[in-house]
Image: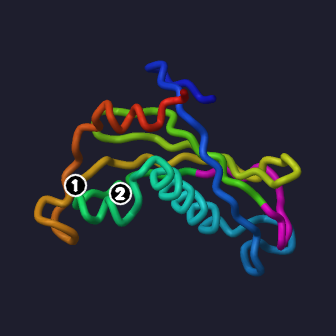
Amino acid sequence: MPITETGFASIRARYACEVQWGDCDPAGIIFYPTYFRWFDSATWAFFASAGYTAKRMRAEGRSMPLVAAECQFVNPAEQADRCEVLSSITRFGGKSFVVAHEVVRVDGTKLARGTETRVWGRHVNGPGSQMKGETIGEDLKTMFRAS
């Protein structure tokens, strides 16, 4: 379990994925936007598993926009490889948080790792209006603490 500088321990989520035709080249290098698509899907699934579904967030005028992302390639893959994205929140700031991801083939081979930095935000006047970052409450942090 990852521990941050502030001692926060996060539960780990799993998101299943599979390398599709067109996701990687003949050298086994997955086209980089694929990793970011998997990371984004894994983050939204992680929050949904804690009760923050996209539907709930829309109803509350809330979102978690991405403000930074990075990814490192580790090992090649092949079409039809089944994988999991293992995700955990490694840091909560005042209004932002970092989600760390590892893409692992089912045989245990790590394919990539990366992070997303997101802001916990709310639309000022409903969906589509200006968004402002909000302080992340202890209730949200508690949902993602390891038990």
Q: Quadrant of residue 100?
A: top right
- The numbered mark, 2 or 1, whose residue comes first in the sequence reads 2
Label 2 sits on a secondary structure element that is loop
Q: From the image, which quarter does the N terminus lie in?
A: top right
Query: Badge 1: how crowded within 10 Å, few (<14), some, or many (20+)?
Result: many
Which mark is on residue 64?
A: none
- On whether residue 81 falls in the magenta region, the answer is yes
**Residue at position x 35%, y 33% from top?**
93
**Residue at position x 80%, y 74% from top?**
25
Label 1 sits on a secondary structure element that is strand
Say what amino acid the circle numbered 1 marks. Answer: Arg
Specify the farthest residue to the bottom. 21
Colour mapping used in the image? rainbow
- On whether residue 6 falls in the magenta region, the answer is no
In the displayed structure, does residue 34 sit left or right of residue 20? left
Compared to 92, does 81 lie above or below? below
**Residue at position x 65%, y 50% from top?**
14
Say what amino acid the circle numbered 2 marks. Answer: Pro
Badge 2 is on which residue?
65
Q: Point out residue 15 in the picture as x, y percentages from the top left corner.
A: 64, 56
Pointer 2 and pointer 1: residues touching (CB < 8 Å)? no
Q: Main secondary structure of the magenta part?
A: loop
Q: Point out residue 11 in the picture as x, y percentages from the top left corner.
A: 56, 35
CA gap between label 2 and label 1 equals 10 Å
Q: Quadrant of residue 92?
A: top left
Query: Badge 2: how crowded within 10 Å, few (<14), some, or many (20+)?
Result: some
Badge 1 is on which residue?
122
Q: Point out residue 99 in the picture as x, y percentages from the top left corner.
A: 51, 44
Magenta segment: 71-82
Compared to 39, does 133 lie above or below? above
Q: Quadrant of residue 88?
A: top right
In the displayed structure, does residue 140 sit left or right of residue 81? left
